[in-house]
Amino acid sequence: MSDSSDEEPNPKRRRGVVHEEKYQRNIIRNARLKGLQYVSYKGKEVPSKAPVNDINYAKTAALMNNEQAQETPDVPTGDLENRKSHSYKYNLKVNGALIQVCRGVFLKVFQISDNRVKRINKCSVLHKSPLDMRGKSRSGNALPGNVCVRIQQHIEKFDVKETHYGGKPEKYLDARLDVAKMHAMFILDNPDLKNKVKYSFYNKYYKENFAYCFGRPQVEVCSTCKRLSAKLKDKGLSDNAKRNVAAGKMVHSRRAKKFYKAMDEASKNKDDDTVALAFDYMQNLPLPHIPVQEVFYMRQLWVNVFSLHDLKTNSSKLYVYHEGEANKGPDEVCSMLLKYFNDIPVNVKHLILFCDGPSGQNKNHTVVRFLLKLCDSGRFETITHNFPVRGHSFSPCGKDFESIKRLLRKTDRIYTPDEYAELMLKASKCGRFTVYHLTSDDVLSFKKWWPKSYKKMTNSDETSGRKVPKENKQPFKVSKYKQFLYNKDTPGKLVAGEYIGGIATSTFTLLKTANPPELPTEKAYPLGKVPINQKKIDDIKKLIEYTVGYEAFLRHHHPMANN
């Protein structure tokens, strides 16, 4: 065995740990500041600056005490520029006594430069203390503050949107934007700064002061999966704890897969009396859709698209409308579901539904009472409504939306919702898309309908007795459950499960009248349109002026067309 085998191997640096004190530049800098010996970048050994105090200010004070200035006699002849007003004596203290030395010896003893002595001489004459001016000089490449103000004002001009999904709202800009395009727009608006504000500076300022993402944030990323995966990688976690985390992750994954498994089983169901549907909203589409940079600074009219996808036939019905005709709430969802159910054959008695769980649209008290009414009236014998685990909510509707987006990316100009509808029909080559234009008259007032005949807050039938302690009662919370089961044989009741196909379920009695009420006939928007903010109307009118389809845009019944 060689001697090299006895040497200890170099320890590997742990990931994420940085030893900056071992960097060569830091070693040289610290040694230079303290006056210690070091090896330069070129390999030259630089001796230490001893014997003097390590602190620069203390050294300067000692120098000022050892320098004695005195006036020189007037020089009768000679150039004024060469005339000296002061002369200096340099002394060293040896064994308590001052010994006068020449300037060269004085510099070598204290290991200092001639310029530093000159600066101290000047300060001693003026009776001032020397100031440390390192790092206080303004860089020649620094931009003035008014340029940063102009960048700030330019970025604030863009229309910032806010997510309505997830717990914490997040702000984002249009998906068609990026920092490079924003910088190009800034240079167009400020041509005098073309050679001053480069992309790197604009990008740095944007990240430090705004850092908005582009396009709606992906909220369907499972935070639980990420958290458990990070715990498993933690080296400080014990083996016992890691086994518990792994078990928790496996249970979470199995519960998430139940949604997809139930969807796959429903799509393979061959019974003629069963219909399986998935429904969801598409990301809002801007109107007008034009390649003009001002579109990013102004408020646009948004077009909403609601998809109902038949899992058995792989066909979809798309409901298209703009925000001046209806909102995106439970009234719209129930109205579109009702219109779709009216077209289903009468022999269909079993309904299976799949959707994600935003409380303002698909998962709320209004939708629950609407589906309960459909079973109580005998339209369907059973209804099964399934919701995914948050972060695991991909559905066939997403595939439909992607095929539509691919075609929209190739289209430069869109002026009306009808043009969007035509593109959606072309998005499927096999003709599996049908489009219906929803109007304000199609939306019924379901939110005002159900409170008259259905309870809002109630305890489960299993815990509603007086013998059950108050702390053990189980109230009806819509957001808590992942599956709702409705049955014609138990009118006014629903069975809720915290997980799809779970054993533990709870039964809730929601109907508070003897008979279920009739479906609503009152319109949600009796005026025939949804009020739009006046600022948005003004911005839309400005955008219309940039389009060649100005008349075509106004011919469509937009709420601002009559203003």
Image (cartoon, grey):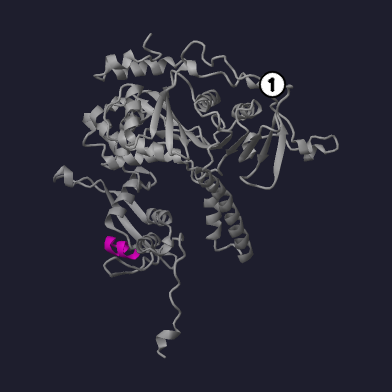
The x, y position of residue 342, in whole percent, is 52, 25
Q: Is residue 480 left or right of residue 192?
A: right
The x, y position of residue 383, in whole percent, is 60, 35
The kind of residue tagged 1 is: Ser
Whether residue 108 is in magenta: the answer is: yes
| 556 relative to 360, above or below | above
- Dominant secondary-structure state across the stretch colored magenta: helix
Quadrant of res 214:
top left
What residue is shown at x 74% (from left), y 33% (from top)?
459
Q: Which residues are magenta?
A: 102-109
- Pick the front one: 114 or 497: 497
- Pick the front one: 118 or 514: 514
| 178 relative to 23, above or below | above
| 376 relative to 560, above or below | below
Whether residue 173 is in magenta: the answer is: no
| 320 relative to 240, above or below | above
Density class for disc 1 (Cα within 10 Å; few <14, some 14-19, many ≥20) is some
The x, y position of residue 338, in whole percent, is 53, 25
Residue furthest out toward the right: 467
Can you say which quadrant of the picture contains the N terminus? bottom left
Q: How many marks?
A: 1
Can you say which quadrant of the picture contains the C terminus? top left
Query: Is residue 213 in view?
Result: no
Q: Which residue is mark 1?
A: 453
What residue is shown at x 49% (from left), y 34% (from top)?
279
- Pick the front one: 73 or 213: 213
What residue is shown at x 79% (from left), y 34% (from top)?
464
